[in-house]
Image (cartoon, rainbow, N blue to C red):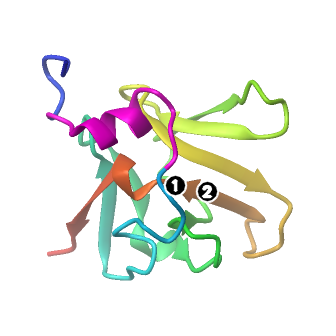
Amino acid sequence: MDNPGYNPLSAEERFVIERKGTEAPFSGEYDDFYEEGIFTCRRCDAELYRSSDKFDAHCGWPAFDQEISGAVNRIPDPDGSRTEVECANCGGHLGHVFLGEGFTDSNARHCVNSLSMRFVPSD
């Protein structure tokens, strides 16, 4: 059941956002997507990532080298080897952040499920 004040979600979106699931690699609408704009939380519409921070990590999910300041929380995953990223506004699961891979100058890769986000094009 959807929470009042949040956008309605499909069963697949709820699985990812609320139950910390993962969409299949290379299946998301934003994996190979490079338009100008902002990616927002699918559940609460909070701004999360800028398209200028998106890059192709060839990992199967949209990758960003940084979030909009204050937009995400980083939480140690129960597996002890990864760090989850969630929306700082509503706590919705976004994906994971990996450090030290050397893809970009920030040395970070936010690996985010397309189902966790919506794209808002620049004007």
Horizontal side, residue 99 vs residue 50: left or right: right
Instruction: Give residue 20's position: percent from left, percent from top.
Output: 51, 32
| Front-lying residue, 85 or 14 | 14
Q: Amino acid at mark 1?
A: Val
Identify the element where label 1 is drawn: strand
Horizontal side, residue 113 vs residue 11: left or right: right
- The answer to whether 76 is drawn above or below residue 1 in the figure is below
| Front-lying residue, 61 or 75 | 61
Specify the label residue 51 is tagged with: none
Residue drawn at point x = 39 percent, y = 82 percent = 34
Residue drawn at point x = 14 percent, y = 75 percent = 123
* Number of residues whose C-alpha sits closer than 10 Å to that of mark 2, classed few (under 14), some (14–19) or many (20 or more): many
Horizontal side, residue 69 vs residue 3: left or right: right
- The answer to whether 32 is drawn above or below residue 29 in the figure is below
Instruction: Give residue 70's position: percent from left, percent from top.
Output: 50, 39
Residue 18 in magenta? yes
Q: Which residues are magenta?
A: 8-22
Residue drawn at point x = 57 percent, y = 70 percent = 60
Identify the element where label 2 is drawn: strand
Instruction: Give residue 72's position: percent from left, percent from top.
Output: 51, 39
- Tell me the residue that label 1 is attached to: 112
- Tell me the residue that label 2 is attached to: 110
- The answer to whether 7 is drawn above or below residue 57 in the figure is above
Instruction: Give residue 7's position: percent from left, percent from top.
Output: 16, 34
* Number of residues whose C-alpha sits closer than 10 Å to that of mark 1, classed few (under 14), some (14–19) or many (20 or more): many
- Separation (CA) of disc 1 from disc 2: 6 Å
